[in-house]
């Protein structure tokens, strides 16, 4: 069901406020799932694209979840969000992606207790090849920004991008912002500093247990992190594995994979890509141009700086021997994931 902007304006005077901006179309797959339920309301309230940017939500779900999506849509209506100009509810990817400016590809099977993310590869790969094709045929190619959240996120981004030959592969990204945020929280806790005091931290590689959370360039309040925590054993045996295994720890504790924190990271990712990072590093899984020896074409997490609606991989960093080893482990895992789904590329 599609509600036009004008029908909403007629229905509710509350929404008839003045803004000169045309609505942007934000497609969300898996919209009635756990993450979707956390995402939609925050996007509709303007937390992702700004408090003056009207939006139309274009929600894709499986046929069996359309009724749940109807309920979510009713709740969105009941919030009377001034910026929400329409809601599309559909099980047809071509409709969900029609004219999309943003696409958050969340819909996929989450892993359960004891599963590694790699085991989801085959189960979810087909979804992303079909959605890549639908994006290629329907989305607004000139403005599109795609974030893949569904796991295994990096390789799903690769599949979607390769199935969208008419869209610049740089417009596809995979989410490692949750890992980045997890790392910041652990460092803030260890040092007693605020998360915004911490700069030049990054995640390299895959959103998986092989990711490399790297503090070798990190500063706190402008001075090297070593002045706050100088404990290589803690970094190797505590910090790195905690960040790498945080998803599994949450599944064990909650009985379900992270949802609110994942939605929050997705909003951070899209907001920063759109509005910039003020010169600060963030982590994004992006199309590799071969930087640092990450094979060209992989969707690899790098430190990036976002500016003028684009992102750029931070260049010129020296990686020490330990970092190079970790980098290579995650790089090789991404290559083996790519090999496992090569029939879909
Ligand atoms: N990258 C990250 O940091 C990160 C973090 C958390 C979760 N995840 C991943 O996000 C995904 C979603 O997690 P969740 O907890 O919301 O799962 P969920 O099972 O609660 O919701 C998934 C939703 O997707 C829908 N869906 C499945 N296949 C679909 C398709 N082909 N088209 C449209 N919708 C479809 C389902 O009906 C369901 O409503 C999982 O793959 C999970 O592992 C990634
Ligand atoms: O770990 C998972 O399977 C879910 C998600 O990727 C996470 O990091 O929380």
Image: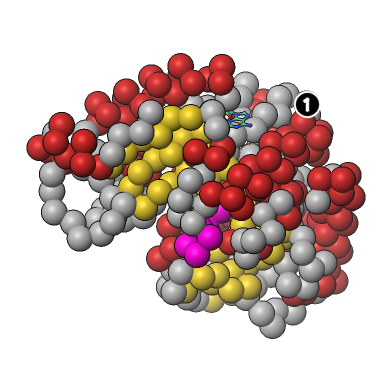
Q: Which quadrant of the view contains residue 209?
A: top right
Task: Quadrant for the N terminus, please.
Answer: top left
Give left or right: position of 204 versus 57: right
- The residue under the point 24% across, 26% down is 78
Residue 244's spot in the image, x, y percent? 71, 46
> In the rendered image of this protein, does residue 65 appear above or below residue 3?
above
Residue 184's spot in the image, x, y percent? 55, 55
Kindly identify which residue carries mark 1.
Answer: 114
**Can residue 278 be seen here?**
yes
> In the rendered image of this protein, does residue 217 appear above or below residue 177?
below
**How many numbered circles does the render carry?**
1
Residue 176's spot in the image, x, y percent? 62, 52
Magenta segment includes 316 = no
> In the rendered image of this protein, does residue 278 appear above or below residue 179?
below
**Disc 1 Cβ-to-ligand 2 distance below 8 Å:** no
- The residue under the point 25% across, 42% down is 5
Give left or right: position of 124 versus 194: right
Residue lying furthest left: 13
> In the rendered image of this protein, does residue 37 appear above or below residue 278?
above
Q: Nearer the viewer, residue 324 or 164?
A: 164
- The residue under the point 67% across, 29% down is 109
The segment highlighted magenta reads 141-147
Residue 131's spot in the image, x, y percent? 64, 42
- The residue under the point 71% across, 25% down is 112
Give left or right: position of 232 versus 34: right
Ligand 1, what quadrant?
Answer: top right
Q: Which quadrant of the view contains residue 295?
A: bottom right
**Can residue 34 be seen here?**
no
Mark 1 crowd level (few <14, some 14–19, many ≥20, 10 Å Cα): few
């Amino acid at each position: 069901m599609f509600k036009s902007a004008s029908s909403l304006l007629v229905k509710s005077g509350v929404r008839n406020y003045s803004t000169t901006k045309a609505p942007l179309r934000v497609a969300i797959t898996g919209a009635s799932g756990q993450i979707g339920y956390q995402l939609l309301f925050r996007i509709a309230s303007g937390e992702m694209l700004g408090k003056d940017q009207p939006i139309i939500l274009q929600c894709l779900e499986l046929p069996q979840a359309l009724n749940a999506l109807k309920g979510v849509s009713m709740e969105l209506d009941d919030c009377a969000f001034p910026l929400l100009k329409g809601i599309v509810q559909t099980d047809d990817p071509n409709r969900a992606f029609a004219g999309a400016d943003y696409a958050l590809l969340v819909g996929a099977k989450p892993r359960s207790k004891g599963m590694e993310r790699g085991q989801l590869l085959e189960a979810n790969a087909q979804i992303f090849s079909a959605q890549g094709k639908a994006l290629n045929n329907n989305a607004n190619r000139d403005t599109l920004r795609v974030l893949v959240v569904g796991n295994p996120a990096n390789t799903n981004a690769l599949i979607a991008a390769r199935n969208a030959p008419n869209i610049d592969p740089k417009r596809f990204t995979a989410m490692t912002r949750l890992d980045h945020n997890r790392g910041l929280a652990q460092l803030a806790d260890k040092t007693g500093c605020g998360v915004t005091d911490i700069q030049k931290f990054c995640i390299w590689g895959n959103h998986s247990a092989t990711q490399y959370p790297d503090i070798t360039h990190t500063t706190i309040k402008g001075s090297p992190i070593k002045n706050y925590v100088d404990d290589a054993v803690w970094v190797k045996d505590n910090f790195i594995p905690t960040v790498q295994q945080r998803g599994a720890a949450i599944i064990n504790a909650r009985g379900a994979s992270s949802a609110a924190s994942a939605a929050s990271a997705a909003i951070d990712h899209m907001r920063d890509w759109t509005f910039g990072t003020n010169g600060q590093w963030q982590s994004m899984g992006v199309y590799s141009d071969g930087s640092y020896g990450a094979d060209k074409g992989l969707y690899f997490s790098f430190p990036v700086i976002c500016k003028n609606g684009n992102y750029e991989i931070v260049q010129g960093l020296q990686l020490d021997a330990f970092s190079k080893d970790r980098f290579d482990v995650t790089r090789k895992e991404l290559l083996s994931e790519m090999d496992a789904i090569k029939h879909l590329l």
